[in-house]
Image (cartoon, helix red, strand yellow):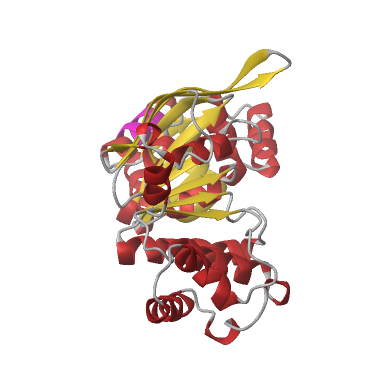
């Protein structure tokens, strides 16, 4: 369990204290993947660095596994940090060291025995799929391969928590997908708690169980990914969701339909197995309503399939009301646009 309680962080600027984080309160459960999303400058990287006290909070508590890190001596803090792995946007690898030596580095700092180091390095190289690259240097690797080295190095000391600070933002979409799949596999295989910092909602949607949205140093919304994604409450959250759910083409289509006098435009969301069932067809057949599809997608939020359709309902006011009620009774989320 990670608990952040009334966390504040400020920096002195020209004789004044400028706040970076204000009254952050979060509880992250053991074994979950927790996402923190925000725009550049929102405070998300400062927040993740406060979790392992690379940045010391101005006020508040950082409690991991029942221990308040802010109360520890420097020696005890160093020992506690070994339970917290971290991977970075720009990899932070030792350029003069091989893949194997980069992974071994934290174990050598901890003065582990050579046999233990060799065994652990071999396990991790196999885990991240770099068996053929163990003797290469970072300059010989692709971005995705470098990040795999970073992940293996972060896991070397067998941590309980893995912090990921924009770990995929320097990667292309295909490589991002492979790194997220690796993190998901590590989470499932080892029950590792992962805190993932990002500015990309599709990253949150792909792997996270819960999320928090940070803006101007404050948490403005948090909750299960599915709930927040489908029912966003804050403007900042809606902006992030638009990254993956809305397009200029859809906005143009909605404007065109409304200009033509068509006002019954709704977004239908099907969750779980309903995504693959003919719920809409059966409902329209029963109510005698027709419809035009303006946009449709099927995707997943981690392990949960979901589908969304933006449609214009075409029928009498009574037919339209009956259609909406019947869809809702069958577990479909209906949002008027």
Residue 255 versus residue 314: which sits nearer the camera? Answer: 255
Query: Who's the residue at 70% across and 37% down the image?
Result: 252
Asked whether 166 falls inside the magenta stretch, the response is: no
Task: Please say if 318 is above or below 241.
Answer: above
Task: Please say if 20 is above or below 183.
Answer: above
Tell me residue 9's x, y (percent): 53, 25
Q: Can residue 330 be spotted in the picture? A: yes
Task: Please say if 242 is above or below 300.
Answer: above
Left or right: 143, with 73 as reference point: right
Magenta span of residues: 319-325
Residue 72 versus residue 238: which sits nearer the camera? Answer: 72
Prevailing SS of the magenta stretch: helix
Asked whether 320 falls inside the magenta stretch, the response is: yes
Residue 52 versus residue 150: which sits nearer the camera? Answer: 52
Left or right: 208, with 215 as reference point: left
Left or right: 164, with 187 as reference point: right
Tell me residue 106's x, y (percent): 49, 63
Query: Who's the residue at 56% across and 35% down the image?
Result: 46
Tell me residue 221's x, y (percent): 44, 28
Q: Quadrant of the N terminus?
A: top left
Residue 258 versus residue 25: which sits nearer the camera? Answer: 25
Tell me residue 196's x, y (percent): 48, 48
């Amino acid at each position: 369990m990670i608990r952040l309680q009334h966390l504040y962080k400020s920096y002195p600027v020209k004789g004044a204290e400028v706040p970076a984080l204000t009254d952050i309160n979060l509880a992250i459960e053991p074994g979950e993947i927790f996402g923190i999303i925000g725009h550049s400058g929102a405070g998300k990287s400062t927040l993740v660095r406060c979790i392992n006290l690379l940045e010391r909070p101005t006020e508040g508590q950082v409690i991991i596994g029942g221990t308040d890190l802010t109360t520890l001596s420097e020696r005890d803090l160093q020992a506690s940090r070994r339970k917290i792995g971290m991977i970075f946007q720009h990899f932070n690898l030792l350029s003069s060291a091989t893949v194997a030596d980069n992974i071994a580095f934290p174990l050598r700092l901890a003065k582990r025995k050579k046999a233990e180091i060799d065994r652990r390095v071999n396990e991790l190289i196999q885990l991240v799929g770099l068996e053929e690259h163990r003797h290469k240097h970072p300059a010989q690797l692709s971005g995705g391969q470098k990040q795999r080295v970073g992940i293996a190095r972060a896991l070397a000391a067998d941590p309980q928590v893995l912090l990921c600070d924009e770990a995929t933002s320097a990667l292309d979409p295909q490589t991002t997908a492979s790194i997220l799949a690796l993190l998901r596999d590590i989470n499932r295989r080892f029950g590792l708690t992962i805190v993932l910092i990002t500015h990309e909602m599709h990253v949150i949607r792909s792997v996270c169980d819960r999320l928090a949205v940070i803006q101007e140093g404050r948490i403005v919304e948090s909750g299960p990914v599915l709930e927040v994604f489908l029912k966003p409450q804050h403007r900042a959250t809606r902006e992030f969701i638009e990254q993956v759910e809305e397009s200029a083409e859809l906005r143009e289509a909605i404007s065109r339909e409304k200009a033509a006098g068509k006002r019954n435009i709704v977004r239908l969301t099907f969750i779980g197995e309903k995504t693959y069932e003919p719920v809409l067809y059966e409902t329209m057949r029963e109510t005698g309503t027709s419809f035009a599809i303006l946009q449709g997608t099927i995707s997943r939020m981690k392990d949960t399939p979901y589908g969304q359709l933006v449609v214009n309902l075409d029928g009498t006011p009574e037919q339209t009301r009956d259609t909406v009620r019947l869809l809702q009774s069958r577990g479909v989320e209906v949002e008027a646009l």
